[in-house]
Amino acid sequence: MARRRKRKSRRRQEGRRILEHVPQFSIESGEDKPVTAARKFIQSEGIVPPALLLVKRNEHTTDRYFWAEKGLFGAQYAEENHFLFPSLRVIDNTIEKPAVAVRTS
């Protein structure tokens, strides 16, 4: 049986494009749970929002978190709801949007 292609959300793709312009930090969770490791890293390094944290849980799994003014969120949530975060709106306004061809007859 043929496998169906997963539909890609335009809103999530837009959010992913915006998050590419945010500083990223890669850490390993060690003995802590991934979210706890992310919070400890933010506290110890004094990271200011917005930031994307990639927390390696084990050799196969990496959890992604978005550090915003409002707190720590899953990166997928931030991608889908990027318009809710003021710091991402500022970044979105500075990114050049691709030109759309308009055909006039």
Image (spheres, grey):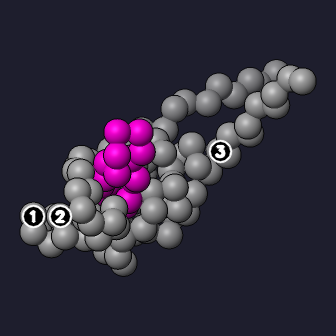
- Counting residues from the start of the chain, the first of labels 3 and 2 encountered is 3
The residue labelled by disc 2 is 41
Q: Quadrant of the C terminus?
A: top right
Main secondary structure found in the magenta portion = strand
In the displayed structure image, the side of residue 3 where residue 25 appears, left or right: left
Examine the rendered structure and indicate whether residue 6 appears above or below residue 33: above
Amino acid tagged 1: Glu
* Kind of element beneath mark 2: helix
From which residue to which does the magenta span run? 51-66
Q: Residue at x 67, y 46 (%)?
A: 9
Outermost residue toward the front in this view: 31
Q: Quadrant of the N terminus?
A: top right
The residue labelled by disc 3 is 10
Examine the rendered structure and indicate whether residue 20 appears above or below residue 2: below
Q: Which of the pair 48/74 is nearer the observer?
A: 74
Q: Which of the pair 42/60 is nearer the observer?
A: 60
Q: Is residue 25 magenta?
A: no
Cβ atoms at labels 1 and 2 below 8 Å apart? yes
Amino acid tagged 3: Arg
The residue labelled by disc 1 is 45
Amino acid tagged 2: Phe
- Separation of disc 1 and disc 3 at Cα? 34 Å
Residue 77 in the image: x percent, y percent?
53, 62
In the displayed structure image, the side of residue 20 where residue 104 appears, left or right: right
- Separation of disc 1 and disc 2 at Cα? 6 Å
Residue 33 in the image: x percent, y percent?
33, 66
Residue mark closest to the camera, 3 vs 2: 2
Q: Which of the pair 97/4 is nearer the observer?
A: 4
- Counting residues from the start of the chain, the first of labels 1 and 3 encountered is 3
Residue 67 appears in the figure: no
Answer with the quarter of the image where residue 81 lies. bottom right
